[in-house]
Image (spheres, rainbow, N blue to C red):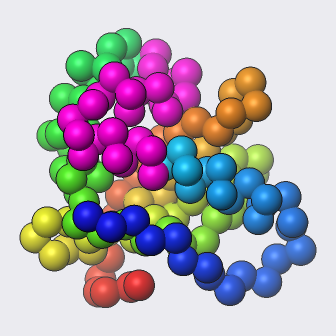
Amino acid sequence: MRILATTVAIFMAAAPIEAQQDEIKSVISSQIQSFMKDDFATAFTFAAPNIKEIFQTSDRFGQMVRHSYPMVHHPAEVVFQELRDEAGTMEQNVLIRDLQGQYFVARYSMVQVNGDWQISGVSIEQSPGVGA
């Protein structure tokens, strides 16, 4: 698996978004790397309080990821795309290729908790083609 940080030419006057993108990429990459090692205890530390409240334990969180998000659990390729501010919530799009060669776009919702970025949700859509 390789994680690629691509620079997407986005013309935006929001320097704060660009300044925060490296931190956000690091959080998402670290969680994916933890998933790949089946280290759900570490992966759970990157989840925002709303996610921790829903699943309560890293074991329950891990079970959900294994069953509902196999493309994120063990991706073949991860490519970061644009980061957007959606009404105060940062949304990082990530192109993911699964082990069967299918492409998906994962939309990570990110929030800051005590100054640290955390993942508050992920929605996945199958990508209609190779998009990197």
In magenta, the rendered stretch is 29-53
Q: Residue 35 at x, y = what percent?
A: 28, 41
Could you tell me which residue is drawn at 31 percent across and 86 percent down? 130
Q: Residue 49 at x, y = what percent?
A: 55, 21
Q: Residue 3 at x, y = what percent?
A: 39, 65
- The vertical placement of 34 against 19, above or below, is above
Q: Is residue 109 visible?
A: no
**Res 8 → quadrant:** bottom right
Q: Residue 15 at x, y = what percent?
A: 87, 66
Q: Is residue 54 magenta?
A: no
Residue reaching furthest left? Answer: 100
In the picture provided, is 22 more to the left or to the right than 94?
right
Q: Is residue 131 visible?
A: yes
Could you tell me which residue is drawn at 41 percent across and 60 percent down? 106
In the picture provided, is 131 more to the left or to the right than 102?
right
Q: Quadrant of the N terminus?
A: bottom left
Front-lying residue, 117 or 68: 117
**Res 41 → quadrant:** top left
Q: Is residue 49 magenta?
A: yes
Could you tell me which residue is drawn at 34 percent across and 47 percent down? 33
In the picture provided, is 2 more to the left or to the right than 47?
left
